[in-house]
Image: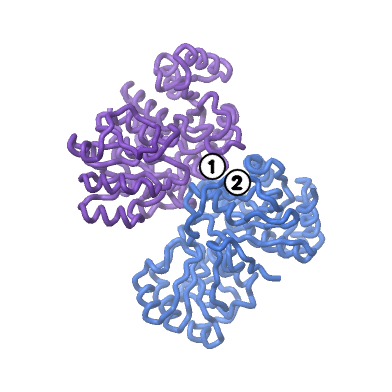
Chain colours: A purple, B blue
Amino acid sequence: MTFHQALAPAAALDLPQPYLLFLGDVTEKGYAKTAFGLRDWAADRCVGEYACPEATVSLGLDWLTPAEAAARGARAMVIGVANAGGVIHDSWIPHLTAALAAGLDLISGMHARLGDSPALKAAAQKHGRRLIDVRQPPAGIALATGRKRPGKRLLTVGTDCALGKKYTALALARALRERGLKADFRATGQTGIMIGGGGMPMDAVVADFEAGAAELLSPDAAPDHWDVIEGQGALLHPAYAAVSLGLLHGSQPDVIVACHEPGRLTMLGYPDYPVASLPEIIAVNLQMGRLTNPAIRCGGVSLNTSALDEAAALALLDSESQRLGLAVADPMRGGPQFERLVDACLAS
Amino acid sequence: MTFHQALAPAAALDLPQPYLLFLGDVTEKGYAKTAFGLRDWAADRCVGEYACPEATVSLGLDWLTPAEAAARGARAMVIGVANAGGVIHDSWIPHLTAALAAGLDLISGMHARLGDSPALKAAAQKHGRRLIDVRQPPAGIALATGRKRPGKRLLTVGTDCALGKKYTALALARALRERGLKADFRATGQTGIMIGGGGMPMDAVVADFEAGAAELLSPDAAPDHWDVIEGQGALLHPAYAAVSLGLLHGSQPDVIVACHEPGRLTMLGYPDYPVASLPEIIAVNLQMGRLTNPAIRCGGVSLNTSALDEAAALALLDSESQRLGLAVADPMRGGPQFERLVDACLAS
């Protein structure tokens, strides 16, 4: 399986690989989701990890300095952090310039542009290296037309950020291809774009063009072709719902899969906002999605059970399936539950 | 009455006035809403109108060349067009450079930046004039916090674009001030910003920061102070719903007023999309708005009855009020219906 699918020319990326993964100063796994995503889905293209001394999160890869990574063949260091606001912290700069000095390009998915740092800009010029901002949308995105496009589309939606929408989309795209179907993973965030080698950074698009960007991401396709689109944010999130709604409208999904992390009671970084229930988030996505695709339906639920042991996880998947009357699986565990979820997504 | 209210420093604008209003090549009134808005709400600051020969829309102001307008005291020519995509057409360039040569600054609310045109950039430099892009959001907008802010907020929402959300907000802000209340008009689009002299160009903000921009637009205020916020787009619009939802969440309105144009059956520029009904658009705005303000309620309805004669308009306002069980008025007609709408917005 490969996720290196051609996108519309303006959105195509060609990133130097393999990578050294940089973890910044993160002390909470949720903020290192970019690095974990690359480790899990592009392991053959990651030579090791590196971080500031104050970081406490590890990927379990070999710890390498930039020079050591370059000696092992790395061509770029990826900033594997997704913090609130997408900020490049000052304390990272010496480590980033060290990577440039060691002969690595820098790849960033942060909102802040690498080239906006005079120190990085100077170091890149001095060492003849590239500063690559994955979060920079292509120029010339058009307004959404609302025109229904041929081809099948599946969108992962969530009750919050950082709970499995990307992994679920990756796993479903892989499963569809393993069944012999035509399917492409469509990345919408920095990690997905780094894994897939292309996509649309939906949260960096100007709001007026948000739905149009989603239309560009999954263009006309053969009637039996599936685009499996990585969801962003949550429709009931106080900061990110605009991104989620534009993506939903422009994606025109035939099928949504609702992603949730059992036990997460409040939204990450928003302790005053309870996480919506699965029935709520499914209902509101179907309700709002009907505007551009009246045939939208829910294929089932993806639970992130990484905090549970195997027995507890399987018991929860079964009880939630009974409670909701839907296929419920953890794509990272696979198994018959996941096959039933794939079946339910394909049922028409 | 003045709408020149101080905003957060980053959003403040100080535009050169009075204006000459430029109509481009428009042949449909809906695309000249910027010019009409300025004529109606900043008449004392508009010396006349000017357009390409192929334009067929007129504001009914004095037709003046840029040189004639400058002789009458104009300090800037405003591009009074709001076309799909916010594009500056090539055919306008000679007329825009003529204005610069005549000693006028240029003010634009288009998505395209004036300075991106080499011809305009060169002409502005040659003549020592300014190119002012009203649609450029301030730098450093933060993510939305979702924190409930003190002060009262009213947001106009709509069943489509270009049917009265801005005029309704302007009229309501004026009415509240005429009743001795503390009230500010908060502009969210290019015309409103030009009228009010400040605001936030919500459709030009990067999607991740859309709700945060709305929070910045209407900051903490006294408990008895009203921010009357200009709505954008429509929550059931296939292209612009992301803008509308971010604005709704960040505005945290206590009161919405739903705006509609009777007789408009399909969305402007989207003939395959029927305009939602008023009950639908009210219900979905209340539903989604509850996330950040559980006390949100509908104050009533604003109908754009400009296509009807006085008797037909008043009859429609009354029948719609009975049908919906809400205060229904046309703010441009005023009268007892409008006073009842203001009463209903203030009722708690």
Outermost residue to the bottom: B71
Residue B284 at what x, y percent from top left? Answer: 64, 41
Q: Nearer the viewer, residue B30 or A340?
A: A340
Task: Answer few, some or many: residues within 10 Å of disc 1's Cα (few below 14, many 20 plus, some between 14 and 19).
Answer: many
Residue at image x 55%, y 50%? B212
Q: Which residue is mark 2?
A: B249
Which element type, helix, strand or loop, lies under badge 1? helix
Residue A218 in sight in this render: no
Residue at image x 34%, y 26%? A174
Quadrant in the picture for the N terminus of chain B: bottom right
Provide the chain ID for the residue under circle 2. B
Task: Answer few, some or many: residues within 10 Å of disc 2's Cα (few below 14, many 20 plus, some between 14 and 19).
Answer: many
Q: Is residue B230 above or below residue B58?
A: above
Task: State the CA–CA distance, disc 2 to disc 1.
Answer: 8 Å
Residue B167 at what x, y percent from top left? Answer: 66, 62
Q: Nearer the viewer, residue A239 or B318?
A: A239
In contact (CB < 8 Å): disc 2 and disc 1: yes
Q: Which residue is mark 1?
A: A241
Which element type, helix, strand or loop, lies under badge 2? helix
Residue at image x 58%, y 55%? B216
Residue B336 at what x, y percent from top left? Answer: 82, 60
* Residue A217, disc: none
- Label 2 sits on what residue type? His
Task: Give the image quarter of residue A279.
Answer: top right
Query: How many numbered marks have been drawn onto this rendered protein structure?
Result: 2
Q: Is residue B270 above or below residue B39?
A: above
- Label 1 sits on what residue type? Ala
Residue B134 in sight in this render: yes
Residue B328 at what x, y percent from top left? Answer: 75, 53
Circles 2 and 1 on the same subunit: no
